[in-house]
Image: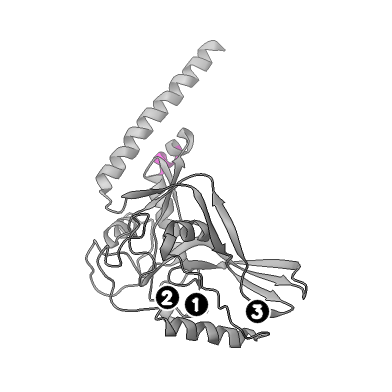
Amino acid sequence: MKISYLFFVIGIIFIGVTTKVAFESNLDVLKLDSLEMVLVPGGSFMYRQSGEYLKDDFPIDAPLTKVKFDKSLEIMKYQVSVGDYEKCVSDGKCEPRKWQGKQDEKLPATGISFNNALSYAQWLTKNSDYVWRLPTDQEWSYVAGSKYVDDALKSDKVNLSISDRWLEKYQKYAEFNFSPVGKVSIRGFFGANENGIYDLSGNIWEWTSDCYNRTRLNASGIELNTTNNCGVRISAGSHRAYISSFIQDARGGGCSVGAPPSYLGFRLIKDGKRDVISRFLDLTRL
């Protein structure tokens, strides 16, 4: 029994060492240029809940709540680049972007659906010893700091129909030029926020992991029910956009609420280290 246990321990150590070396060399070979990270300390902020809220069947602004993060968040300093995403495509793990023509590899990758971004996160995770994932809407809003926009309508009009409210939101975004199209600009064009994160709320909206939800309240404001639609996800930017998960260009359709984003891209959060067994199993599949 003791001998078997000893061999088991030696085997685990061997797997850990060989897997670590293999994954580090994988990242070294890939030479990704989007891995510069920013560590944002934990804290709290006022957050406008996402989704649609109906009170007595009339749409209202979502509640404003205080959200606290006990731990720091480590997020990419820049959006994932064209060159980095294309390496995932070349590896057969990501679908091609919706883009015609050749782009500079250093530009932010656009023409990206939620499903594309998810595939990239999974690919990057399998090629490293960390878990990479999309931020939640709360996390994105928190690290955005002063770049976070409370997109509540705050209208004096009451009992607006869903269609009338949609038109008011569209007009609001148009008046404040919240959806500038322009060209895809070089890294850093839209500047950094106070956390040192670049190009937030520019003309590229960024995918989050959150599903679209609808919450119904009675006339007294008591919650009746909430329904989630994970076929539609939140894309964060100058305003929230609710986009079907397979859409790569929301200007051509697929935007569920409000003005469509100019471009769709993403950046990732780096979570804790992966366990040895899962890294080894992924290594055998690469």
Q: Quadrant of the N terminus?
A: top right
In the image, what residue occupies the spot 53% across and 45% down?
70
Q: Is residue 190 in the magenta section?
A: no
Q: Are marks 1 and 2 in contact (CB under 8 Å)?
A: yes
Vertical relation: 96 (above or below) 286: below
**Left or right: residue 129 compared with residue 52:** left
Separation of marks 3 and 1 at Cα, in angstroms: 18 Å
Element under disc 3: strand
Mark before the other along the chain sequence, 2 or 3: 3
Foreground of the two, 104 or 158 = 158
Q: Quadrant of the C terminus?
A: top left
The overriding secondary structure of the stretch rendered in magenta is helix
Separation of marks 1 and 2 at Cα, in angstroms: 8 Å
Residue of label 3? 59
Foreground of the two, 93 or 217 = 217
Residue of label 1? 255
Foreground of the two, 104 or 234 = 234
Vertical relation: 45 (above or below) 272: below
What amino acid is at disc 3? Pro
Separation of marks 2 and 3 at Cα, in angstroms: 22 Å
| Quarter of the figure with residue 27 | top left
Vertical relation: 129 (above or below) 116: above
Mark before the other along the chain sequence, 3 or 1: 3
Q: Position of residue 234 (x, y in %)?
A: 51, 67
Element under disc 1: strand
In the image, what residue occupies the spot 48% across and 86% down?
171
Residue at far front of view = 156
Residue of label 2? 261
Give the crowd class for mark 2: few <14, some 14-19, many >=20 residues within 10 Å.
many
